[in-house]
RNA sequence: GGGCGGCUAGCUCAGUUGGUUAGAGCACUUGUUUUACACACAAGGGGUCGGGGGUUCGAAUCCCUCGCCGCCCACCA
């Protein structure tokens, strides 16, 4: 079989162009089935459930970092040979999606009520079907190697069944209950929302002092008043008491009396309650049980009536008397004016209040009493707490463990009903006789009385009620499927730290409760992506960075590598354009190195050896092979420790500095002779190959493309594609530390010569003579002479152990125990050279002093580890040797 | 009110069991059409590691304290 000739240098474009590569390779991977795990009962799988993005959303940097970090883990484990499943999907996003569709309807001059529930839901499905592809395709652009054949949607049939099963079970266990509670109400969404969906913002406002007249009692000549403080005067209209602390000497005599509500003149009792802080405001507090959580509690304790003064749409109810129908803020304004007129407004103070807003629409939340469904969380929280406490689940970074446990220890019941149409409808039916039936299948009659006059609860469940089941519902639960048996529990839950409560903690609770096992053994939390100024990205600020634009401009790999290396786990990062450009350049560097290596080694046999199959012949060979072993070991360990940023950085440094700047340059020399030609070609290819493997999780496209070119026409292939090529194995026994030290000396010599040339302003192209007094390293250095010649642009160096006479008219460089002379007759200014030597002498003396001082310290020599002390002794000796040589040189030059 | 994080070169960030003279990229200075890459190569300048105190032979790293900046949680109206 004819081996196709490798592509010549000229055949590949000079600059790496991501656009011509990415789509093609993604299709190649997806159509090749590489994203689909092969179930092997003898192997433990690696599984990640992808956090399902909102169907209506467009890809943003949050998705980009999630996708990047997860794909890094997925590709790494896949290359390690584990059956690897990354299960993707989307979330129906109840409120968000409904809001989008409602907005669309508004544009068409209609609304959901005119349309009716059924039509509205159908309309929303249409929208979803249309837009789901957008987020999928955008995810594909990021290179996510997820198994799209297993993709799920939170509102699909299977997951709806899971949701229903869970609800009914919770109901049967008494953990799902319906009750009249004070909840957070969004007057714009016209729905209850959970505590977590309220965003509190400190807002400058006013604290109004309002006095309430007391109903006169016998013998009271003048009207008495009691003054209360409030930030929401409109709630006065719903007051049903005034409360004071029973120990408050100023007021305790008033307990039991009756106050008259301003304007409405409704009589309300004055009560005593310990919740009242004597030090705040006047020490007397108005009580509005319907519209305030604290007041609700007080109302319960004292059996106060609840009066709804503010309606669900934030206008005033009939209870508000003259203000009925007014918007809550309009009412506030009018009421304040009226109070002022009546002389009841004592004063208004500047005051900052924590104001709750709807997470979705930003509308100010109105706390009010409503009948809703709740989940009793405390019984679910305890096992979830223990799972982390006893190490069954590890959180990375660890500090978030505290956030997690604090929340679970103080958990409150979860309001799960939403007054929306888009979502999982609550599977509860009510009959005429006031019975409830919760059922897995739609019932035809009341389970209690058999009445057929039943009606389903109109509400739907919180979006998170389906997401919290994600790790097992997506694998087929409640059915006992092969996928569920094989892939559950999943491995790592990777997401942003901002949804620990919303999602992560709840998944742990549901996993343990319904599956009997934790849903994942590791929680990895990444930080948030911010703009260049460190601000949160938001549409209103106009600072949203579009990942698609970045990928268009710089390529997916550049974006991914930047996201992976710009921060450490759990810490926020700024997405800085210069960094993206730098990583685009890295991709190009890789491309060009590969282009060169392919051309350079074209026609030379030996294939692409594994690192341990290479035959290092030269110092540089032994050095790069040793470094490569070290790199593999280090990167592998970092991957296991979730230190992806550091792993990426190490690959970058190795590839660019060690491989490109040194080894590839040296290979140009080594390839000229016959004796090292084939071995050098082998090492060039071997290191390129392993670099692409290590890099693949981070920069999948350029690495795969290069790898495919590398193996083009090769008969022996370790795999059909890099995406499934084996992760490189390190052998630390192959580390050659003496070769690394010897090579470091060579690098030192070369760098010093280059520096001296620059300082002496030697023309860049001019070759200069070099004489080396090697002091025991002559044999080794002679072998490297061609490298010095090539890399430092010198004439063939003359290398001796000792020099009978030191060269005159020469620059003297002391490099790692070796004297290097650059005879530059006519170019050297003696005074200048003396000054240079003096500066070096001063620096050497400083080094000696520092070392000597340490070693003279008996505390140091006796207490520090012996190897540290030994190292310090060697250092001192080397500095002293250097000083001696410098001083000798100075004497020779006379001075 | 409680908790967490950040403060390291002009900028963006690394620095994980404490161990020389603290690193990278960008920016800056200087030079270079050297057998891939100017999205490059070579050389160089630049940091009292937020302040103070302590532990230690030795601290960017551990402890205490203060100061900014940011985030999370929390029913003082």
Image (cartoon, rainbow, N blue to C red):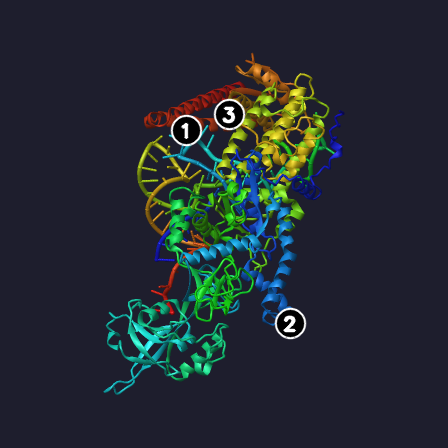
Q: Earlier in the sequence, mark 2 or mark 1?
A: 2
Residue B62, horizontal then vertical, whole percent: 37, 40
Q: Secondary structure at mark 1?
A: helix
Residue A109: which disc?
2
Foreground label between 2 and 1 = 2
Q: Are marks 2 and 1 in contact (CB under 8 Å)?
A: no
Q: Nearer the viewer, residue A830 or A506?
A: A506
Sequence-first tag of 1 and 3: 3
For marks 2 and 3, give the CA distance. Answer: 71 Å
Q: Which image quarter holds the N terminus of chain A?
A: top right
Whether residue B54 sits left or right of residue A772 in the image: it is: left
Residue B45, image x, y percentages: 54, 37
- Can the viewer see residue A34 in this picture? yes
Q: Which residue is nearer to you in this view: A31 or A200?
A: A31
Q: Chain of mark 1?
A: A
Disc 3 residue crowd, few under 14, some 14–19, many 20+, Cα 10 Å: some
Q: Quadrant of residue A79?
A: top right
In the rendered image, residue B13, in percent from the top left (x then y), is placed at: 51, 44
- Residue B17 lies, with reference to residue A477, above or below; the image says above
Query: Label 3: which residue?
Result: A732
Reading the image, the residue beneath label 1 is A850
């Amino acid at each position: 079989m004819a081996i196709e000739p490798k592509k010549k240098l000229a055949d590949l474009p000079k600059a790496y162009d991501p656009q011509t590569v990415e789509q093609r390779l993604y299709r190649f991977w997806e159509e090749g089935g590489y994203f689909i795990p092969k179930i092997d009962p003898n192997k433990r799988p690696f599984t990640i459930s992808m956090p399902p993005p909102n169907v209506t959303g467009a890809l943003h940097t949050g998705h980009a970092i999630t996708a990047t970090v997860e794909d890094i883990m997925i590709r790494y484990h896949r290359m390690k040979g584990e059956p690897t499943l990354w299960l993707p999907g989307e979330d129906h996003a109840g409120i968000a999606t409904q809001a989008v569709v409602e907005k669309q309807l508004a544009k068409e001059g209609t609304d959901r009520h005119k349309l009716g529930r059924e039509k509205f839901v159908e309309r929303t499905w249409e929208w979803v079907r249309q837009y789901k592809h957008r987020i999928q395709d955008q995810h594909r652009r990021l290179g996510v190697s997820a198994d799209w054949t297993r993709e799920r949607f939170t509102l699909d049939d299977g997951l709806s069944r899971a949701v229903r099963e869970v609800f009914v079970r919770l109901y049967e266990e008494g953990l799902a209950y319906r009750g009249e509670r004070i909840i957070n109400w969004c007057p714009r969404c016209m729905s209850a929302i959970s505590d977590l969906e309220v965003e509190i913002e400190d807002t400058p406002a006013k604290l109004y002092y309002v006095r309430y007249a007391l109903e006169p009692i016998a013998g009271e000549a003048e009207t008495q008043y009691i003054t209360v403080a409030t930030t929401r005067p409109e709630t006065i209209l719903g007051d049903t008491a005034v409360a004071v602390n029973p120990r408050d000497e100023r007021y305790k005599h008033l307990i039991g009396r009756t106050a008259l509500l301003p304007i409405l003149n409704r009589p309300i009792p004055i009560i005593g309650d310990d919740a009242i802080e004597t030090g705040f405001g006047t020490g007397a507090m108005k009580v509005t049980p319907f519209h305030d959580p604290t007041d609700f509690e007080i109302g319960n304790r004292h059996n106060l009536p609840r009066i709804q003064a503010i309606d669900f749409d934030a206008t005033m109810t009939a209870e508000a008397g003259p203000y009925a129908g007014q918007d809550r803020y309009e009412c506030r304004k009018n009421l304040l004016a009226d109070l002022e007129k009546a002389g009841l407004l004592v004063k208004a103070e500047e005051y900052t209040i924590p104001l709750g807003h709807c997470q979705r629409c930003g509308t100010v939340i109105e706390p009010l009493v409503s009948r809703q469904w709740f989940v009793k969380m405390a019984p679910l929280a305890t096992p979830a707490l223990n799972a982390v406490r006893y190490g069954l689940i590890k959180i990375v970074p660890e500090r978030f463990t505290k956030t997690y446990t604090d929340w679970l220890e103080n958990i409150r019941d979860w309001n799960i009903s939403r007054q929306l149409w888009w979502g999982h409808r609550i599977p509860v039916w009510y009959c005429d006789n006031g019975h409830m039936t919760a059922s897995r299948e739609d019932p035809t009659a009341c389970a209690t009385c058999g009445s057929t006059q039943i009606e389903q609860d109109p509400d739907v469940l919180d979006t998170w009620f389906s997401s919290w089941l994600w790790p097992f519902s997506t694998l087929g639960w409640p059915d006992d499927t092969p996928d569920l048996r094989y892939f559950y529990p999943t491995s790592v839950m990777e997401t942003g730290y901002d949804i620990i409560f919303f999602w992560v903690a709840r998944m742990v609770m549901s996993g343990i409760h319904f599956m009997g096992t934790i849903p994942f053994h590791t929680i990895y939390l990444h930080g948030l992506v911010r703009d260049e100024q460190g601000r949160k990205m938001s549409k209103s600020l106009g600072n949203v960075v579009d990942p698609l634009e970045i990928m268009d401009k710089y390529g997916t790999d550049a974006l991914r590598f930047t996201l992976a290396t710009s921060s450490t786990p759990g810490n926020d990062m700024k997405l800085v354009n210069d960094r993206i450009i730098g990583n685009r350049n890295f991709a190009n560097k890789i491309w060009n190195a590969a282009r060169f290596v392919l051309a350079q080694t074209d026609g030379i046999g030996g294939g692409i050896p594994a690192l341990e199959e290479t035959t290092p012949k030269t110092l540089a060979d032994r050095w790069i092979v040793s470094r490569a072993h070290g790199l593999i070991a280090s990167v592998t360990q970092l991957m296991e420790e979730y230190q992806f940023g550091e792993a990426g950085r190490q690959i970058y440094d190795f590839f660019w500095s060690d491989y490109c700047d040194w080894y590839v340059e040296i290979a140009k020399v080594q390839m000229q002779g016959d004796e090292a030609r084939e071995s050098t070609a082998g090492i060039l290819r071997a290191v390129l190959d392993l670099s692409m493997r290590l890099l693949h999780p981070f920069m999948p496209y350029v690495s795969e493309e290069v790898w495919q070119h590398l193996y083009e026409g090769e008969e022996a292939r370790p795999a059909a594609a890099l995406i499934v090529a084996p992760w490189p194995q390190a052998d630390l026994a192959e580390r050659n530390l003496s070769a690394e030290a010897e090579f470091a000396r060579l690098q030192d010599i070369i760098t010093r010569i280059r520096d001296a040339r620059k300082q002496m302003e030697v023309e860049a192209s001019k070759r200069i003579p070099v004489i080396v007094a090697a002091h025991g390293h002559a044999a080794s250095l002679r072998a490297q002479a061609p490298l010095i010649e090539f890399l430092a642009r010198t004439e063939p160096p003359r290398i001796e152990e000792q020099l009978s006479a030191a060269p005159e008219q020469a620059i003297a460089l002391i490099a790692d125990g070796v004297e290097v002379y650059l005879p530059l007759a006519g170019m050297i200014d003696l005074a200048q050279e003396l000054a240079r030597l003096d500066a070096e002498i001063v620096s050497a003396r400083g080094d000696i002093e520092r070392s000597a001082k340490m070693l003279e310290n008996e505390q140091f020599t006796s207490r520090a580890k012996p190897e540290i002390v030994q190292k310090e002794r060697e250092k001192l000796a080397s500095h002293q040797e250097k000083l001696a040589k410098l001083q000798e040189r100075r004497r020779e030059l006379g001075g």
